[in-house]
Image: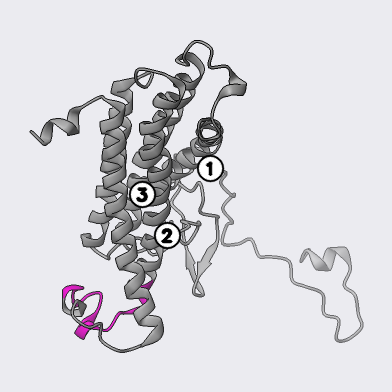
Amino acid sequence: MFLKHFYSTDHKIIGLLYGFTSLFFLLVGFSLVVLIRWQLAYPGEPVPYVGGLLGEANAPGGVILPEFYNQLGAMHGTIMVFLGVVPLAVGAFGNYLVPLQIGAPDMAFPRLNLASYWFYFAGGAIMLASFFVPGGAANNGTSYPPLSDLAPTDGQTWWLFGMMCLIFSSLLGALNFITTIVQLRAPGMTWFRLPFFVWSQFVTAFLLLLAFPALQAAALLQGKDRLAGTSFFLPTGLAVSLTARSVQSARPRSSRSRRPRRHHDDQPAQPPDRSSGHRPSLEQGHGA
């Protein structure tokens, strides 16, 4: 009986699904920040009760390693914003209340509304699963290149896939909200009679449509940098920790400009000897 709610297209049921799922992710994000605060309060001390559950690769003897601390900070910020606060405010309250406040029978696209939730759920599952991949979760919460392109952990790639699912979910929801508010208002519900909550959801949907496509494209290009060997965010001649990093370009070698090879008998021109104050002539400079 309970499983049928996961396939319901009713806006109230979808709003409740968003609400309970976002509360779960808020609990996960709160748990991560508890570990962060413990490390700040008692650096180098084993985490009580749950330290042994973190794994020897992340917390040997219950002591949080610096790499795992960075993962906790990055994933805490991602989970609290993209999986907790925004889905709770927009997905949960928006889906439940907007159709009721404008007199609409349901959202304009009920199946699209359900698809938006499932993309959100899939993105959250990928984010949590990234803790168990080789190298651990993403350790760069803002995903700034070139550090995120060169991150040795596979969790950064999983983070990008999860973000793409979350962004696609937000775009579907934004289109649904805009269409519902514009087309399905009850007779007599003019723009100046809309509640402030509906106006906030309407403006938020437009902001999501303006901001998230660029973020989606950046995540896609960064994923290609990590998986396909492109260099959208990797500059040539990059040095990390005083070590030069060579960037493999996806372009064919024939398209690159080649320098003419120098023969063995061609000697480079010698610089003039300024110690004696004598300036060689043009012929002497070329060795003629």
- Quadrant of the drawing holding the N terminus: top left
Task: Look at the picture and state if 101 lies above or below 284.
Answer: above
Q: Position of residue 131 (x, y in %)?
A: 25, 61
User: Outermost residue toward the left?
Assistant: 1
Mark 2 and mark 1: Cα distance apart in space: 42 Å
Q: Quadrant of the C terminus?
A: bottom right
Name the front one of labels 2 and 1.
2
Magenta stretch encompasses residue 209: no
Report the Cα–Cα distance between label 2 and label 3.
10 Å
Q: Which numbered disc, 3 or 1, marks the residue that appears first in the sequence?
A: 3
Does residue 252 lie above or below 69 as drawn?
above
* Nearest to viewer (mark 3 / mark 1): 3
Q: Which mark is residue 83?
A: 3
| Residues packed near mark 2 inside 10 Å, few (<14), some (14 to 19) or many (20 plus) | some
Residue shown at 34% from the left, 40% from the top: 165
- Residue 275 location (% of width, % of height): 85, 86
Q: Nearer the viewer, residue 189 or 167?
A: 189
Q: Which mark is residue 77?
A: 2
Image quadrant in which you'd find residue 43: bottom left
Q: Residue at x 26, y 42 (%)?
A: 122
Is 67 within the magenta?
Answer: yes
Q: CA distance from mark 3 to mark 1?
A: 44 Å
- The label shown at residue 256 is 1
Pick whichever, 90 or 215, lies toward us. 90
**Residue bounds of the magenta highlight:** 53-69
Badge 2 amino acid: Gly
Element under disc 2 = helix
At x 54%, y 38%, the residue is: 211
Type of amino acid at the residue the image marks with label 3: Leu
SS at badge 3: helix
Callout 3 crowding tier (Cα within 10 Å): few <14, some 14–19, many ≥20:
many
